[in-house]
Amino acid sequence: MAAQSNTGHGGRRWHVLLFPLPYQGHINPMLHLAGLLHARGFAITVFHTHNNAPDPARHPDYRFVPVPDGMSGPAPVAILDVVAHIIAMGRACEAAFRDCLAAFLEEYSRDAVACLVADTHLLPVFEVATTLRVPTLSLRTGSAACCSCFLAYPMLFEKDYLPVQESQRDMPVIELPPYRVRDLVAVAEDHGGLERELIARAVAAMKLSSGVILNTFDALERRELERLRRDLAMPVFDIGPLHKFSPAGDSSRLLRQDRTCLDWLDAWPPESVLYVSFGSLACVSARDLAETAWGIAGSGVPFLWVVRPGLVRGSSADPDPDDHHHLLEGFEAATRGRGMVVAWAPQEEVLRHRSVGGFWTHAGWNSTAESVCEGVPMLCRPCFGDQMGNARYVEHLWRVGFEVGGGLEKGSVEAAVRRLMTDRDGAEMRARAGELKKAAAEYTRKGGSSCLAIDKLVAHMISLSD
Ligand code: UDX
């Protein structure tokens, strides 16, 4: 992509300010966006909390401004704690962010700042920027369908889709096809209103902003993007898949990547290896881990498995590389020679590797987008949030994989892995995923639709400061 020189009033270079939510699945798309805007000539300043702070040494071209978040201890891992943490953290860093932003605006002329892009889940950041007259754009890191679901939340309660009743789980949500009630964000038991609050605040943040940026593209979500543009009545920029414009490499990860798995993959025939990973937050029970392990072992399929610290409910999230070994006692010996277990993988590169033929995933949006863009079909085991909805699209709409639901048993895992990796059914899913890969390549090529959407985003950013 051609680097342009974007200069502000008085010939100074335009700044774009960014504020990611400090979780891996949110940091990655924000730093992809940073790379993309930097390539377009913008100076990049990243405001960040102390929790999960990025490493400035990995981004020598950007300026980093730490914002005291007033939160003690590491970021939580249990999902309800994460939701509470996100809300509390936003509130806790509000005053400090006001000071940091005011100081920044004093140092750099206000005229040189094009806008601030913040994660949709950081409402106080939008409020502070608005009072200091800095225009904002909202980065929503999930799908367009999920974003529409957020906007539809009041309707979903009004029409009794939510809170979910066990008897209605399979009922279609006619206003949001192809979702069923079970696919909606927060279908689980009463979460004390926390998720409802999180979503209401995200919608308020989007409405306060001057546009929404999405890591998706038309070939995946044409109808959903149209609906979103209609419902939001503000510019919506579908500039995905972001990782194709600015690959993460090693730059944004919070855990140390084990890159030896790329050499290990080299030894296998094309499309033969199953990659297994549940992202950065999803947890599994020790029982499910064991059933999954022995099911994969029984399938006879070679595999690369990410067992990150803290993956097993109740286990330590400390990055002790040996932590996972005792959890899989006997399994590694039984599968020696055709399996590799790592604590964290260079996932984008793994999915791009010619040997990888399938992905057992929790269906987080980044993982889903990365997989379809590399033509890798998926086995989805969604856990929370937007993951159920993403899995629905994978199975029902794009037909590039299927969900492994219900209680996990070794035998059903074995059958599911074989279906994806060696059956005709799986080959058809792989062929359809290959079509999406071609579409992603077409969208991200020079002059492709996503590139044009980026041009529009850049023009919009600059126009905001007029
Ligand atoms: C969370 C939510 O779970 C997800 O549903 C939401 O859309 C974003 O926030 P996370 O659970 O971490 O994200 O999943 P996902 O969205 O898939 O993001 C994980 C990221 O970590 C991906 O970009 C993936 O490439 C990266 N990753 C994962 C690695 O680099 N190495 C690994 O071993 C595993």
Image (cartoon, rainbow, N blue to C red):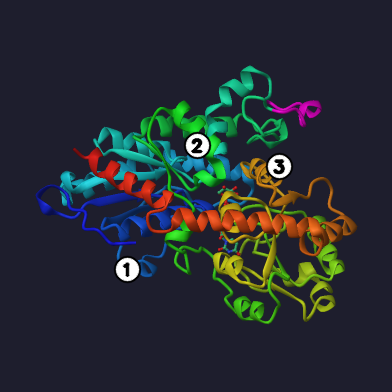
Find the distance from the CA under tag 2 to the CA under tag 3: 18 Å
Per the image, the residue denoted by label 2 is 225
Per the image, the residue denoted by label 3 is 396
Find the distance from the CA under tag 1 to the CA under tag 2: 35 Å
The mark lying in front, picked from 1 and 3, is: 3
Q: Earlier in the sequence, mark 1 or mark 2?
A: 1
Instruction: Tell me: is circle 1 under 8 Å from ligand 1.
Output: no
Kind of residue at disc 3: His
Q: Is residue 445 visible?
A: yes
Per the image, the residue denoted by label 1 is 60
Name the magenta segment's main secondary structure. Answer: loop
Answer whether labels 1 and 2 touch (C-beta < 8 Å).
no
Q: Quadrant of residue 274?
A: bottom right
Q: Position of residue 163 (x, y in %)?
A: 68, 26
The mark lying in front, picked from 1 and 2, is: 2
Q: Position of residue 419 (x, y in %)?
A: 81, 58
Residue stretch in magenta: 162-172
Q: Which residue is at a point 77% across and 31% down the rendered structure image?
A: 170
Quarter in which the N terminus is drawn: bottom left
- Name, please, the residue furthest toward the left: 10
Q: Earlier in the sequence, mark 1 or mark 3?
A: 1
Q: Quadrant of residue 457?
A: top left
